[in-house]
Amino acid sequence: MMAFCIAQIPQWLAEPGLQHFLIISAILFSLGLLAVITRRNVIMVLMGIELILNAANINFIAFTRYSTLSLEGHLIALFVIILAAAEAAIALAIVLNIYQRFSTVNVDEISTLRE
Amino acid sequence: MAEHILESIQLFLPEIALTVTLCVAIIADLILKERNHNVAYVVIAGLVVTTIFVFRQVGFNESIFSDMVAVDPFAIFFKVVLLLSGFFIVFFSIKCRELDANKKRIGEYYMLITAMMLGMFIMAGATNLLLMYLALELTSVASYILAGYTKRARDSAEASLKYVLYGAISSGMLIYGVSILYGITGATDVYGINAALQTGDFSPLALLTAGILIIAGFGYKVTVAPFHFWSPDVYEGAPITITAFLAVASKAAGFAMMIRFFKVSFIDAELLTAAGVWDIIAGFQWNIILAVMAVLTMTLGNLVAIWQNNIKRLLAYSSIAHAGYILMGLVVLTDQGIASIMLYFVMYLFMNFGAFYIAMLISNKLNTEDIEDYKGLGYRAPLVCVAMAVFLISLTGIPPTAGFIAKFYLFAAVISAGWYGLVLIAAINTVVSLFYYVRIFRNMFLVEPQGDTTPVTFSFSSKLLVFALLIPTLLFGIYFKHIVDFAQSSVKMFGF
Amino acid sequence: MEFSIFGIGILTWVVFLPVLGMIVVLLLPKGSGLAIRVTTVVATGLQLLLAGLIFAKFDRSWLGINDPESFQFVEMYRWITVEAVPWVGRIEINYFLGIDGLSVLMVILTALICFIGAISSWNIERLEKGYFALYLLLATGMMGVFVALDFFLFFVFWEVMLLPMYFLIGIWGGARREYAAIKFFIYTFVGSVLMLIVMLALYFSVTYVDPATGEKVHTFNLLMMMDPGNYEPGSVLFGVDTTWRYAAWILLFIGFAIKIPLFPFHTWLPDAHVEAPTPISVILAGVLLKMGTYGLLRISYPIFPDATVHYMYPMAILGVISIIYGALCAMAQTDFKKLIAYSSVSHMGIVVLGMAALNTQGMVGAVLQMFNHGTITAMLFLIVGVVYDRTHKRGLNDFGGLANQMPKYTGVVMVAFFAALGLPGLSGFVSELFSFLGAFDTFRTLAIISVSGIVLTAAYMLWTLQRVFLGQLPEQYKNLPDLSTREMITFVPLAVIVIFLGVYPAPAIELMNASLSYLVEVVRAGGEFAIIP
Amino acid sequence: MTSDTLIQFALYILFLPLLGFVALIFFGKRLPRQGDWFGTGILGITLILSFIILFVKLISYPAETFISQFTWIDFGDVPFIGPISIELGIMLDNLSVIMLVVVTLVSFLVHLFSIGYMQGDVRYSRYFAYLGLFSFSMLGIVITHNFLMMYIFWELVGLSSYLLIGHWYEKKSASDAAKKAFIVNRIGDAGMFIGIMILFVTFSTFTFEKIFDSIAIGMIPFGSEAWLTAAGILIFCGAIGKSAQFPLHTWLPDAMEGPTPVSALIHAATMVAAGVYLIARTFAIMTGDALMVITYIGAITAFIAATIAITQFDIKKVLAYSTISQLGYMVMALGTGAYTAGFFHLVTHASFKAGLFLGSGSVIHAMHEALHNKHDHRTDPQDIRNLGGLRNKMPITYLTFLIFTLAISGVPLTSGFLSKDEILAGTLGFASVTGHYLIPFIAFIVAGMTAFYMFRIFILTFHGNHAEPSRLNDIHESPAVMTIPLIVFAAFSIWIFYSFNPFGATSGWFYFAIDRPMSVVPSVVQPVAADIFKEAVHHSHTLAMILSIAIAGLGILFAFVVYHFRKLDADNLAKAAGPFYNLSYNKWRFDEMYDKSVVNGTMGLSNLSAWFDNYIIDGIVNGSATITRWWSKFTGRFDNVVIDGLVNFSAYFTGFSGLILRKFQSGKVQTYIVFVIFSIIVFFFIFRTF
């Protein structure tokens, strides 16, 4: 019965392989870029960046998990997360500053320096 | 393990000194009542100490913290360059009127500079991709803030925003690329990567993806096309001191990191010859990509620079062009090329700082950054303008100035490696660059002063600083034996 | 042949005296105009004196060209020596000066013209200090080019001369001075960049083994580059008649042709001349143009004999075109200075034709023509300067009948003009004669075509003479003063030289005959030489 | 008296005039009477010296040739060619010593005449200085022993002629004429220069004898006779220029803008004869074909000039054309091989033509004064229609002029008869040998025409009645300084000086002194051999004499019929002649033709190339002018842009692409990122292959 139940579960779901994670991360990465490019609101752009970083993280974790490697991957992921936080903090501060100056957070309108 | 760490710390003293300086600066900023450039002197003191430590490292060729950081002649050379620029920048900042608007936070300014220095020091030495990434971020984060640090609020606020967004994304790409590379090789330190790649069982496609993403990440730091877009805007918006710092120091650090990464991790140990001509592992011809980028960079930089009227922006583009020249040195895959890059940075430091510094002095006095306002300045401030002319000539690369020697060695390296096409393009670019450099001193000397013709005078210390930059620029033009020796002997990296 | 003063070689003195002068000028307080002028004249005067000394002490029989033993007044010091590192051998850049029959005449010419120019700069009013400082720097640069035997040194001097020229034209020039200055700057800079590339290629191809240490040494020593034995096998410029060698020759040639200036690289010249102040025009035409042809003879010929022989015919054709084309253009000008500028193009064409012939008469003719053109054109530009100073007009049709008003002046003009159109008895004739004789020996048709140039030259020169000096004197010039003493001082020495060399050129020819014959042998030996009828 | 002394004298003769020139140029104004007597005196000395040389040479050393030379330039042993050293030096043979006398004599007399004629001229001393310079250069031509010096002095006489024609340079016509003279001569000289180059390149020497010797032993340029012929003809080009032969003859009539004594000296007696002298000097290396060319050029010239002379009204122009015609005669004579006759005619012609010019000069001088007194500045004193009836007023001039006219018309008992007669005989002989009968035909026609037009001007000037009788009272005979030269020249126009037999010069000392030199050219291209030729001439001699006398008489008679007895009306004749008259009157429209073709052609070409230079060359380097101009038109900032260094197309292009590129810098950070990503993808696809 139990076995049956298990048998019911599709094989790829039972034990997902490295590719799956890579694909996920790739998709995340692309989505991140998409967000960065398309969204006009700075906050959204920042979120996109977070996506990109996390895509990287997934890679690291996945690689560590699926290979006979040390824990470096996890380590790196931690660092990245921390840095992402730091970056976000700075970025938000700057956005705040921008909002005071331009009273907008629309990236397009912040383009006085050009050519 | 423990003693290894202890030994490592012995060799990590310069960075530690910088860290300490940073903390001291913060504290000093807190306790010092009156808000002025006092912190600067703390920082200078810190830099002096660091210098001492750096010079005590000369001759070492070690890898510390279990292949995290290398202390080798290569790193030391760049640390010296960084220290030099650090000193100059601090002096500039003391002179810079632009920063006075918010004297209140001047302390932060200096400590951020120290932070940048720290980051760049680590960049110069890092042999581990993670550490490289961290150092890069440290430098960037500090510079994000510095870029926004000035009275001309709108511009610099915008600059910092663009910078942070662009920077974050680029570093994101970098780390993503790193993750893939990690997946391929299972290592994050360059030696491990190299060892893994030697075996040759990896999918070139993945390597290519990773490589290009990493190039994008580094390319952003060293402002080579097509990853340079942030720089003109940021350079224009940021305070001139920071612009100079970014244009020289962070570029140098970025190149140091880039060179080390590419050389060490992709070098093919079998093909390494004593003649210093090394070849790279089959499967990823990154040097071709870099060659294309070099051509793009120098051409674009020069062509666009012609149209700039803002001196800072013009120098920004010119520095992009120079990045293009410098990149050639890495493309040719010879120690000679790398030596010429290092030489170039020394020369470039003096002449470019010189140009920026005088631009700053002028904007201090005349409160303008528009080249059209330089008309007839040669008759109002002869000394400074002559110096400016010399710096620009040097940037163009006409003897007998340092710039010529730098270009000379670079071209020499490229020719001896047989990249004649590349050097021809570079030569043509040099001619193009003449247009806009000439335009500046043409405005200074060939045009009569318009309107105000009162002489412009500068304080003694300012002049002193000018000479501090002018003399090397001329001296290295006619006597450059030792500097070349130094560069050539410093090509040695740990491991290779 | 050695000669030194206070333990410093005479050539170093000749080259760097002006720099000393420049330093003095810069140190002089503001407003001491007279002192500045005097310093300049003294500095250049001493230079001329030393040049005279060289002329006296020069041993006519020594060959030079590619033989280090037979150069004279040689000074050789290590300048830059970068010790060997694993990937490149030792690198040497020497402070290597020396002269032979090819350069001695140019040294004398340079000294002379600089001196004359200094005197005629007397009435420069604006920013004297800057002007004379730059002028002296220019003098050093030019002199250096003619005595340097190390390619690096040569290049440095070549470039050093560039900027002073730019500023001298750009600041003290005429109405469109900026245009002219930048044009000159860019043209020349293009040339020197090309030269730089060839220089580097040569530098990596040429090595010699240091007998002392036995290590390979890369060097910029021109004489080393002239010895085929010194070329690294497999290096880019190794071998004979290779594509790379041809390419290198062409790059060099363009670099020099811009300076000469040879059709079609000549268009910077008229502008530069028209805008430059008189003394600078004099320098420009008198010395600068010679650097191009000198470079060809000193560098392209002995280092690339194969390519030189391979390209002698195209070179000659360009020469002929310049001769006739320049003359035709000159004929169409209405601006006195422009006319003379184009006449320079025509006359330098003769030089190129002569040296393309690759025989002694041709070479001697060419080098002599370099000297004579220097003196004659200097006179011509001074002549223009005289009327321009007085009337601020240069249009050929603005004048007439000056002959009655200014007899002395007209006398000088007669000498200069007839020398320029190659009248026998004046120096121009001798050099043209031998250039043509040499050319005719090698390529008959071209020589015959080019002879038509002398008719055209006569035509436009006489036409100018008629328009400016003959006919009726316009009312407004009824009280033009004749030549002042200072102007006479500038003219007389040149006129004397022009006449003397016209009557008895042997002293000048003796100087170079040996060296040039030897150069001919060297070049012809280097390549397959064929007479083109 | 030894040869050395002769050489010394010769050198004095050469350099004294130069001394005079230098002295007069620098100190002329300070010398007494502005140094006219100084100059004249110097020439007097040279005259005496040259007479001495003549006598000594002809009496003691009739056969020798004296040479003295020094090395001018020594190239040493030239690689691939062998030793080259260039000698300059002088040579005294019969030809040159006779020429020396001719030159110095004419020059001296002209100096003398000028003292009167140029009285009170603005540049009096300058004038004498230039005469000195001319004498120097001319003498140089005469006694040189090599081609180089020949060329050098050739150009120098050109210079002095330029200076003297342009003596009154305030007149545009004068300076034009001077310029024309020099340039036209330059064209001829260019040819000569090429010829000399051919010889030098072959024999690497300039000296006559060395070249002659090496040709004699069979060395010829580039191994082909054609080149030798070419060399001959090219050298003859020099003569074409100097001796105003067709087609370069147009400068000589214009040269009459100079002072009349100058015309007498340079453009009648000596310089223009230099061409003939050159041919005589180089006769030995002239191949048969070359001589044929020379003959025909001479004949054509003689004919054309004569036809033009008939209809001119300006007395000096008539004389000018008659000079050209006579020079053509000499050239033709040399061409046919009548060497001695040709040179003989040069000598005789020198005296009577110089005389004619001086005579006309004296007339013009007188007329000028007369008009001056009348304050008449419109009437042209040189126009024979304004003259007439001067017979009684100026007897000496009249008589001498008569003698000269007879001489030039070839009437017996004159020197002209002797020489002309020999030439005609020569042409006949030549024809009988080679069959070119056109030559003698032309020769005789020209002889007739000469007689006619010479008497035409003679009659119109001295006979009949003056155009405006009142003017006659103001006309006086010229002063002695001017009449004495006339008398001397008249004397030298008598046969007696040249041969005691008035009907044949062959017996005279001249034929004894001058003999046709041996031709050295290879036998295949030899001209008619001397002996055969002599034979033929001997046969045709009497015939020639009779014919020449008859034809001369005919011409003179016709002249008298038309202009003295007025039996025929000149104008009707002109109408009858119609187109021929116009053609002749307009000098065959040579000048117009040349202006249209050569002058305009060159100017057009030069303007074209100037345009080409500004717009195309400057364009290609500077980029196409159109774009630059377009730029300036649409953005009025051309200069600004130019000055900013965007001088040229490359720069323009540079700037333009910069303009495009900087558009990428949109200022929108997201756009940047798009570019980045895009370029990453591009890289990815490009380098995937690696």
Image: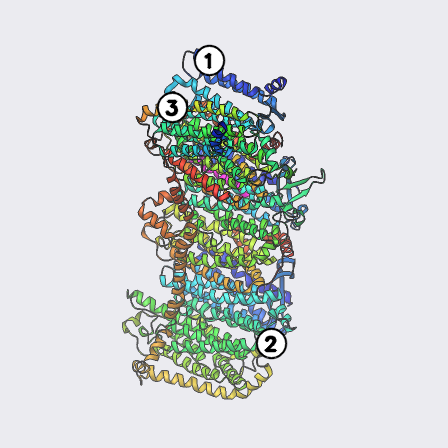
What's the residue type where badge 2 is placed?
A: Ser
Depth-wise, is mark 1 or mark 3 nearer the camera?
3
Is D595 left or right of B120, judged from the image as shown? left
Which quadrant would residue B274 be assigned to in this image?
Answer: top right
Instruction: Answer above or below: position of D470 versus B340.
Output: below
Residue visible at 63% across and 25% down?
B60
* Label 1 environment density (alpha carbons within 10 Å; few <14, some 14–19, many ≥20): few
Across and down, in percent, residue A67 comes to 56, 30
Give the SS element for disc 3.
helix
The answer to whether residue D620 of the structure is visible from this angle is: yes
Chain containing mark 2 = D
Depth-wise, is mark 1 or mark 2 nearer the camera?
1
Check contact, mark 1 vs mark 3: CB within 8 A.
no
Q: Which residue is mark 2?
A: D519
The answer to whether residue B83 of the structure is visible from this angle is: no
Is A40 left or right of B220, judged from the image as shown? left
Depth-wise, is mark 3 or mark 2 nearer the camera?
3
**Which image quarter is the C terminus of chain B in?**
top right
* Label 2 environment density (alpha carbons within 10 Å; few <14, some 14–19, many ≥20): many
Give the SS element for disc 2.
loop
> Magenta stretch?
C126-144
Residue visible at 35% across and 72% down?
D314
Of the pair B347 and C281, the residue shown nearer to us:
B347
Magenta span main SS: helix
Q: Which residue is mark 3?
A: A92
Q: Which residue is mark 1?
A: B27
